[in-house]
Amino acid sequence: MLIRPRHLLPLLLALATLPAVAQQTNGLQQRMSKAEFTAAGLDKLSPQELANLDTWLSSHPKVTTRMVSASGKPVFYAGNQKRSTIETRIVGHFDGWNKGQSFTMSNSQRWVVTDPDSHSCNPSDNTEVKIRPSILGSWMMYVPSCYENVHVKRVR
C-alpha cells in the first residue's frame, strides 16, 4: 500500500508538538529499506520530524486483541462477526444427550449441552451434526439421525 505524504500531514502536525528527542537506533530509517522509506514519503521529513515520529511509534506499541471475555473465558465470535452453520461429526459413540454433557467434534471444537432435558437417540458412531446460530447469541445442535435439536455452548 502506498502512503501518500498528504496522509501523513495530520500525524506530523500532532507530532510537531512533542518535545525534541534524539533519534533512536531502531527508528524507521533503520527498520525500513531505503525504497520503503522513500515510498512512504518519510525522506521528506526533517530530522526533528522523523525523531518525533519515531518517538510516537515507540510509545504506541502494537495492540494485540485478546479473544476472551472480562472473565477470561474464550470468545469465539467477537463483535459483529457473522456466525454460520457448522457441519461436522461427533467423535466416537453417540446415543443422545444430557445437560452438561460435552461432545468433541471432528473439527476439534468441543460443545456442551445447555438444555435441561435429556434425549435418547439410536446409537451410532461419528454421528453427523449441524450446529446453527440461534437467537441472542446461542447455538442449536441438530442431529439428523435423531430429528432433534439441542441448545449447546462452545467451550473449545
Image (spheres, grey):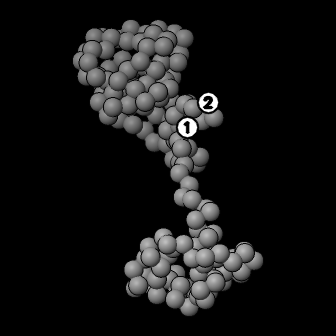
* Left-right relation of 113 to 79: left
Q: List the residue tagged with mark 1.
A: 68
| Residue 64 picture location, percent across and down | 53, 51
Disc 1 marks which amino acid?
A: Val
76 or 2: which is nearer to us? Answer: 2
As displayed, is residue 19 above or below residue 88? below
| Residue 78 picture location, percent across and down | 55, 44
Q: List the residue tagged with mark 2.
A: 71
Q: Residue at x 27, y 14 (%)?
A: 93
98 or 53: which is nearer to us? Answer: 53
* Left-right relation of 156 to 15: left
Quadrant housing residue 145: top left
Disc 2 marks which amino acid?
A: Ser
Give the distance between the C-alpha atoms of the residues marked 2 and 1, in whole angstroms: 8 Å
The circle drawn on residue 55 is none
| Residue 21 picture location, percent across and down | 65, 75
Q: Residue at x 54, y 11 (%)?
A: 116
137 or 12: which is nearer to us? Answer: 12
As displayed, is residue 143 above or below residue 63? above
Quadrant of the snapshot with the C terminus: top left
| Residue 103 picture location, percent across and down | 38, 20
Q: Tell me whether circle 2 and circle 1 mark residues in contact (CB < 8 Å).
A: yes
Q: Residue at x 64, y 84 (%)?
A: 48
Residue 150 makes an appearance in the image: no
Residue 15 makes an appearance in the image: yes
